[in-house]
Each structure stands twice: as structure tokens, then as C-alpha cells.
Amino acid sequence: MNDDQLRERIRRALDAVHRPDPGLVRRSAEAAVRGRRGRRLVAALTAVTVTAVALAAVAVALVRHEMERQTGPAVPTPSAVSAGPVVYTLTAANQVVAVDRRTLRVRWTRQVAPPPSSSVSAGAMLGISADGSRLYVLPAESNGGGTSVHVLDAASGRPGAVIALAAAGGPLYRTFAVHPRSGDLYVVGQDSGHVLVSVVDPVRQVVLSTSVTRTLPSPSTLGNRPYQAAFTADGTRLYYSYGFSAAVSRGIDWADVRGPGVSPCRAASPGAACIPSSPGQGFVIDGSHLLFADDSVPVQLVETTLNGTVVHRSSTGLSANVRDVVLTSGRNQVAILASCDSLGGLNTVDRSTGRHAVVVTPAPAGSEPSSSTLCGLRPALLSDGTLAISQVTQGTPTPELPGTLVFASSTTGRLIGSVTLPAQAVDVLADG
Amino acid sequence: MLHGHGRSRARCNRAVAWARIPHVAVESLPLLLVTSPDVAAFEAALGPLINPAHRLATAMLHDSAAAQDAVQEASIKAWRKLDRLHPGSELRPWFLGIVANECRTTLRSRWRRSVVPLDLHATTPGLVEATAVANQDTLRAMASLRHGDRLVIALRFYLDMSVEEIAEVIGATPAAAKARLYRAIHLLRTRLGEPEEPS
């Protein structure tokens, strides 16, 4: 085969593939010009953005300078220099400890109130403002709860306002939620025979209203823990769980937001919760559904509508006491944190199939849990899928014993690290 | 110095052209792009080269649609770099070099590698079976060559370029281009199962 024959063979083969396109010139021209224009647009937007950021930085510096001129410079603790995700914990001794997620070092510690006179059951007693600048704390005076909300600067732990909710001898408050739009705090408490919701404006530092949301059949039936409160995404409805294992009334109630007050749900029978569950611990709101782990034997994962109609109930096969639940970042699984003393550990349950998987099993029954045992009370799921868990060996944290904050993968249970706390933690909160 | 002035003038001319464009609604943007002086300038400068570039890209990729994409991408890059072209430089080998590089980038992508075998079978409808088999053998033999070898084969036998022009496209001396072409032809003949032509 000479060169001409080779040329002919190549040409024939390629012509069979080649499809001449008369419009290609115009399309290429348009693509080239548009590409140039796109680059110019990007350059212009970049210039505008850089200018805006620079101006904002100058404005912040001027404001900060003016504030420091009036009030003196803020002095952060040395460990607060590095900026990163922060996990806040409230200990049973009423200390707030801020832990840097990246370095696993304590950034600051603040004693917000005197230690209570007794051990304190866990619950949602920490909250953060929408902009992440203010930390709200509800310290317990006893296992019954507290009477004031403390405001801290989230970055430095510097104490701010203390907002009194009730006078001595009045109701005790155990949990609260931050309204997603107004920023008001809806604090859930109890007195003898009643469950109450107080609305607090943390900026003006005033209690806007207090509503009785449930009257109990007898003063002794509530037990001692409203445990968790949370809003729906649009902020129109507040859910809160309460109850005690021996109580008649236990489960989850809701209250619709009405101006400065709330309008409570009506239960099917007097004394019962609107969404009965046992014993009224952690729950998750996911869009129009509510999820919680009913602490029966075996544990059941229950999914209801926002009005409490059960849409899915699956048996997990788990026989331990449930401490709390977290919706994983993929929203298709619920991580269940169960007690150490009955082989609970960290478990996951698939929402659609109910399939239960043990991620980490704690120490065998009767053995003391080790430092790497994933069991505890309150979990917080970080954006990278890490769980921060307040680890305890018993159900009720004590102010006298040091505690541990454990970081572990929510999917594999792999221990990432731990931080020693001055006392056992009753709540954990991750920023953002 | 002259080169710098020329580049500034080119930018200035384009800036003037852009400055002539009035504020228009977003809806009329496509029409504006078609009628703007930049499009006309592109068509005047690179338009005659698009079809040879498409042929080259087809020879490199063995896929006409992928070749169109490569040519469009190369056009964007060439238009951005047009200011850097030295005065007196030949536009054709410069642009074809950009197209060849774009084809190499395309071939390196996993997506491209995964679809090449399918195209070999899909591009021969209606042909006599023996011819189709021969074409596939030819394409397969070309596809087995390294990028540089396939490039000189395509330039020589599909675009009918001289050794000097090939040398400009691949950025080599004519002697080096001739040596590479000789080696590529030898390899291709071997892959085609043909005995080497006596020199």
C-alpha cells in the first residue's frame, strides 16, 4: 500500500464518521464571544464582591473600634483564637463549655449559675440565636428545673443578660426552643399540676406571656422533666416532650403560636398527651412529620404527622432504654442513642424499612462502659456527620463527677476523640 | 514594543466595539451576540478554519459530535488568546494546534474513553459490509496510535498539509515533523497488517 492508497483508505474511513455541519462556524463564533462575555461578567462580579467585602470589613472594624472605645476591648480566652465549628455543653454543675470541633480543645468555660443541689436529668437546655452570636442557657437549680435564662456571648462566653422567668417558689422550667423567625424563646416548665409555656424576648429581656398548656389529673403525675422543645420550620407550632416513666401523662404535646402566647393542643382524653409516647424524650421534626423512638420492648420507631396520626411504626429489635434520637444528615435514618447499662449504644434505624443496625455496642451488661463506649444522654449531629455525645454511665448526670464529650462517626461509630468536662453534661448543642 | 502596541490596539478596538453595544434587555441578548462586531470578527478570522478543524477533530476523536464540541471549545480558547498571536504568524496551524490539544483533553477524559467503542460501530450504516469492516480496521488502527502520531497522520492524509505546515502545528522543525510522520506511517501500516512499503 503506497501513500496514496493509504491516504484513500484513511479518508474513506474518516469520511464515514465525519458529518459536515454548516452551522458550526456560527455556533463556534457565538460560543467564543459568549465565553469572552462570560469572563468579563465574572470579572466584574468579582470586582464588585471584593469591593463590597472590603467595605464591610472596614465598617466592622470601625464599629468594633467604636464599641471598644466605649466599653473596653473584648479579651478572648487564648483558646478562642481559632475560629471553627463549636460544640457547646451544659454540665450538671451549670458550667457551659465550648469545645472547638476541629482541635477538640476547650475554647472557654463559663459558670453560669451555682451548681444545683442534686443530680439533674438531661434535657434540651441550650439554645443559640439564629445569627450564632448569642447562647441561651437554662441552668437547673434542682432536678425540677430553673427559673431564669442566661444569655452568653457565643464567641467568648462573656455573660450577658439574666432573664428571670419566675419568682422563687414558682414554676420550674426545664427546656426551651428559639423561634425561627422572631428569635423569642419559648420556655416549657411546670408547677404543681400544670405544664406552662412562657414566651421570652431575649433582646428586650422580658417575659411576653405565660400560658398553661396542660392541667394534669393530679399534681404528682408529670414527673420532673419536660425534656425537649422544638418548632416546625415555619415557626407556627411548638412541640415539647415531657413525662416520667411512672407518670400518667407523658408524650409529646404541641402548642400553636398565637401572637405573644400559645394555643395548646387538645388530647383525646384528659391527662393524656396529644401524642402519647413513653417516656417522652427526644424527638425529631422533619418537614411535616414527627419522629421519635417509643421506649417499649422492643423499641419502636414511630413516625407521625404533625397532628399526631401515626403513619409508620417499625419495631427495631432494640431492647435498651432510649436516651435520644437524631435524624442523620441523609434524613433517611434515625440514630438512636440508648442507655449503656442495658446494651444500648449507638443504633441506626432505616425510616422506610425499619431495619435496625447496631453501630456500636457498649460494654457487656454488668461491665463498666469504657471511654470509647458510645452511650450517653444528649447527642448533637454536626454537619460532617459526626455525633457529639454527652457520655455518662448513669441516667442522671451528677455535678460532682467529671464528664466526657465524645465525638464519633454517626455511620461507623468510629471514635474521633473525646474531651474531658468538669462535670457530666446534661445537654449538647452544635452551632450551625 | 510594536507587538505590545498591536495587542493594546486590538483590545482597544474590541473595547470600542463593546462600548457601542447599548443597554439591552436580557431577552435580546442572543440576537445581540449574533449581530455584534465580535461575532463578525470571529467569522472573518477563524470562520474559514472551522471546517478543517472539524475534520481534524473527527480524525482525532472518530466521533463527529464530539469533534464539534472540541472545535467549539477550541474556538473559545483561541478567541481568548487571539491577542497573544504574534504579528505575521499563520493563523491556521496555530488554531489547529489548539484543536489538537482540545482533542487530547477530550480523549483523556473517562467519559470519552467509555464511548469510543460504541461510535466505531454506530457510524457505518448503509455501507457494504466489507467496506465497513475495512473502515473499522482503519479507525481502530488509528485509535491505537499515540496522540502525536495520530495527529501527524490526520494532518497529512486527511487535511493534506505539507510537512512544513505540520511542523508548525506540532511546534517542531520540518525535519522532526518529517521523522515523526515517517514513524507514524510505519506504525499505522504495521497496525493495519500491511507489509512496509519499500523505500
Image (cartoon, coloured by chain):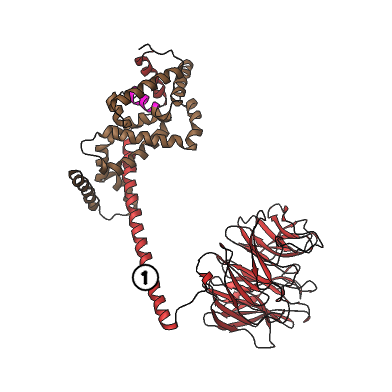
Chain colours: A red, B brown
**Image x and y of residue B162, in percent:** 28, 23
Q: Secondary structure at mark 1?
A: helix
Majority secondary structure of magenta residues: helix
Residue B127 seen = no
Q: Is residue A249 above or below residue A312?
A: below
Residue most extreme to the bottom: A168
Looking at the rendered structure, the kind of residue marked 1 is Val
**Image x and y of residue B98, in percent:** 34, 36
Q: Residue at x 42, y 83 (%)?
A: A70
Which corner quadrant of the image does residue B169 belong to? top left
Q: What is the quadrant of the N terminus of chain A in the image?
A: top left
Q: Residue at x 32, y 54 (%)?
A: B25
Which corner quadrant of the image does residue A159 belong to? bottom right
Residue B173 seen = yes
**Image x and y of residue B92, in percent:** 28, 32
Which region of the structure is painted magenta? B149-157
Q: Is residue B156 above or below residue A316?
A: above
Which corner quadrant of the image does residue A198 belong to? bottom right
Q: Nearer the viewer, residue A287 or A258?
A: A287
Q: Residue at x 25, y 40 (%)?
A: B85
Q: What is the quadrant of the C terminus of chain A in the image?
A: bottom right
How many marks on residues? 1
**Image x and y of residue B197, in percent:** 38, 12
Q: Is residue A162 above or below residue A331?
A: below
Q: Chain of mark 1?
A: A
Horizontal side of B195 relative to A429 (left or right) equals left
Residue A100 is a magenta residue? no
Q: Nearer the viewer, residue A111 or A328?
A: A111
Mark 1 crowdedness (10 Å alpha carbons): few <14, some 14-19, many ≥20: few
Residue B151 is a magenta residue? yes
Q: List the residue tagged with mark 1.
A: A58
Q: Is residue A135 above or below residue B95?
A: below
